[in-house]
Image (spheres, rainbow, N blue to C red):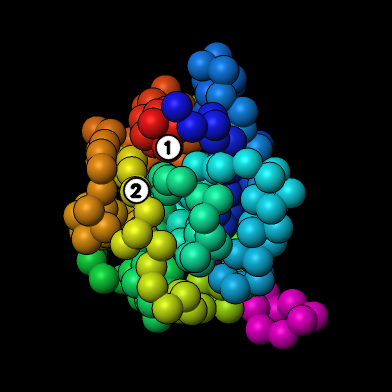
Amino acid sequence: MSEQPVIVLVHGAFAESASWNRVIRRLHDHRLTAVAAANPLRGVEGDAAYVRDVISGIGRPVVLVGHSYGGMVITEAAAGNPAVQALVYVAAFAPEPGESAFLLSGKFEGSTLAGALEAYPVSSGGNEFRIAADKYHHQFCADVDAEEAALMAATQRPVTERALTDGLSAGEAAWRTTPSWFVHGERDLNIPAAALRFMAERAGSRGTREIAGASHAIAASQPDAVAAVIRDAADHAQG
């Protein structure tokens, strides 16, 4: 058997590293090491470069896991990176070269995210977005309780417009050469389930799980299911 991989978890927009806490607890219960990276959410190439630095610092094989926009980042970060043994897309974008989060989210009907966003300019240029506090629970995490949703809204990390419109710059999508797994909610209001199914099928997913009634925030609301898919990927990576 090969060396046990480290699980590297990359959050998406409107979330933060602690959004993985429940998943991490379950991975630890199965003696898996996990690291939640702080995704800058500034732009695909720069965010991916940071995640590559995290992987390099670990110095061991990894299973790279991305949620939502984090799927853009892990696809870029894994390109040509031999340390990445498997990819897990958690309600996440799995782009082809040139595709952006904005393009993929609009490929199928059903996303209501645009109507929930607040935009404001940033000093580095352009705008960034956050989900309005009074819309966060319904839009992002309808299947957690109101108290937790309020905390998640308060700790959400905004994302730049550039990050959402950047296309994948890698010459080849990493999921074409690295085994991938997918898990998502059936009632995702950020990325329509139809888009998530499409990307999983296109990527030749080794295992896809759609959770009935689940929201976009499945790492918080469905940690058992998410951790189980990650364990499947880790088992494959370890041989």
Question: Few, some or many C-alpha atoms within 10 Å of disc 1 (few <14, some 14-19, many ≥20)?
Answer: many
- N-terminal-most mark, 1 or 2: 2
Location of residue 214 (image quadrant): top left
Question: Image check: 17 left or right of 142?
Answer: right
Instruction: Identify the residue at horizontal 69%, vertical 53% (top origin).
Output: 56
Residue type of the residue flagged with mark 1? Ala
Secondary element type, mark 2 = strand
Position of the N terminus, as image quadrant, is: top left
Q: Residue furthest right?
A: 123
Residue in front for this viewpoint, 132 or 183: 183
Mark in front: 1 vs 2:
1
Quadrant of residue 100 within the rendered picture: bottom left
In which quadrant is the C terminus drawn? top left
Marking on residue 180: 2
Nearest the eye: 44 or 52: 52
Q: Looking at the image, which residue is at 79% across and 80% down? A: 123
Residue occupied by mark 1: 237
User: On screen, 27 above or below 76?
Assistant: above
Any mark on residue 146, and which?
none
Q: Is residue 46 above or below residue 10?
A: below
Q: Residue at x 46, y 41 (%)?
A: 217
Q: At label 2, which amino acid type do we have?
A: Ser
Is 221 displayed left or right of 151 in the figure? left
**Residue 98 place in picture, x, y as percent:** 40, 81
- Find the magenta span and give its range: 114-127
